[in-house]
Image (cartoon, grey):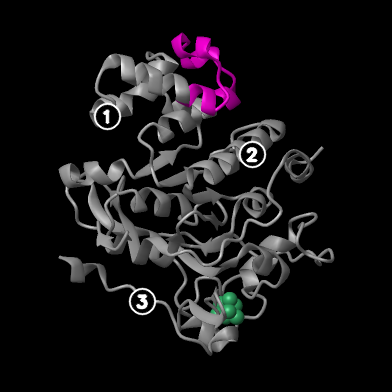
Amino acid sequence: MNLATQIAQSNAPPDRSPQAPPPLVQVTALKKHFPVHQGFFSRVSGQVYAVDGVSFELRKGETLGLVGESGCGKSTVGRTVLKLLEPTAGQIKVDGRDITHLDQSEMLAYRRRLQMIYQDPYASLNPRMTAGEIVAEPLIIHEVGGSTKERTARVATLFERVGLRPEHIKSYPHEFSGGQRQRIGIARALALSPEVIVGDEPVSALDVSIQAQIINLLMDLQDELKLTYLFVAHDLAVVEHISHRVAVMYLGRIVEMTDKATLFAQPLHPYTEALLSAVPIAKTSSKQRKRIILKGDVPSPIDPPPGCHFHTRCPYAHKRCRSEAPPLRQVTHDHWAACHLHDGGPKLPLAKPASALA
Ligand code: SF4
């Protein structure tokens, strides 16, 4: 049984599209570049343009799926939004407050509101701590919960909420299955009652049957706790099920963004079309698409092509595409695309040069 069938059978609200709730997180022209070091003296010889001018908003209570091939910069976006990485340029606002340049102590308060679930639950859990200690650690760091007794009670509640048994509290990470370890990661992320959770490929390391259980758990938690998710994934079937809206990334830029149903039924960007054509049966589409095989490999983010980054592989590329980068423009209501084939509408803010931050 595939993932789509398992989730459909065991889940879930039929319509997960809220009525345009207000933005909780606003990301504007975000850039994250990493220096490339070379030679004996480790001189900087170039930049990896991992995230290169990304703008989007996360609306209260929604899930925005951030999707793209490996190396497109989607995980870097998630880590930079949480300030686990310092942005090279751009702006991150939470509830209207600019957190882009907060130092570590100022950021501590925001850490409580913004949490992360990691891809590899085993690597992200300290093997020398019991599961109970792992979940209690954020409470101790943030001095939440007062007494040990109160923290122990909070940990027990979290274990029950994520489907772990009380006796698991004293077990070590190696004693759990992959799915159980991810439940510990989720309990830890929930410990401080956050509003926003970034999931960095949180189910991609799990078996398909376990993926469905974890996705169902995340959706239940969202409904119950009014959580807002930025869900980073490469698997379109997973993104289709959990997301309200979807943003598609290619080589450090968002190339298309809209609600899930529109994206799967009427993609505008040639890259999105190609990605969707590789999905065997897209639940929201009425007919099977003709498979589009893209030529060539994804270019290196150290030396991305000029103009539209996708022009080296795009079947519709024309002269303008090779020299002029298309901004992300509004094509129809809440449907945005970065393509010269759809260049009529207003555009999202472009990034300032990195030097403008200095
Ligand atoms: Fe293709 Fe040009 Fe559109 Fe880029 S801008 S996706 S190269 S048609």
Question: What residue is disc 3 on?
Answer: 350
Task: Determine if residue 126 is in view.
Answer: no
Q: Earlier in the sequence, mark 1 or mark 2?
A: 1
For discs 3 and 1, the disc positioned in front in the rendered view: 1
Q: Position of residue 42 (x, y in %)?
A: 23, 46
Disc 3, disc 1: CB below 8 Å? no
Q: Position of residue 90 (x, y in %)?
A: 29, 65
Q: Sort mark 1 into few (<14), some (14-19) or many (20+) by Cα contacts within 10 Å.
A: some
Q: Estimate the spatial distance between the alpha carbons at disc 3 and disc 1, rounded to whole Å.
A: 40 Å
Assign the magenta stretch its main secondary structure.
Answer: helix
Q: Earlier in the sequence, mark 3 or mark 1?
A: 1
Task: Determine if residue 216 is in view.
Answer: yes
Disc marking residue 216: 2
Residue furthest toward the right? 287
Quadrant housing residue 252:
bottom left
Which span of residues is magenta-colored?
158-181
Q: Quadrant of the C terminus?
A: bottom left
The amino acid sitting under disc 2 is Asn
Q: Is residue 64 above or below residue 342?
A: above
Disc 1, disc 2: CB below 8 Å? no
Pick the residue in front: 48 or 90. Answer: 90
Q: Estimate the spatial distance between the alpha carbons at disc 1 and disc 2, rounded to whole Å.
A: 28 Å
For discs 1 and 2, the disc positioned in front in the rendered view: 1
Q: Secondary structure at mark 2?
A: helix
Disc marking residue 144: 1
The amino acid sitting under disc 1 is Val
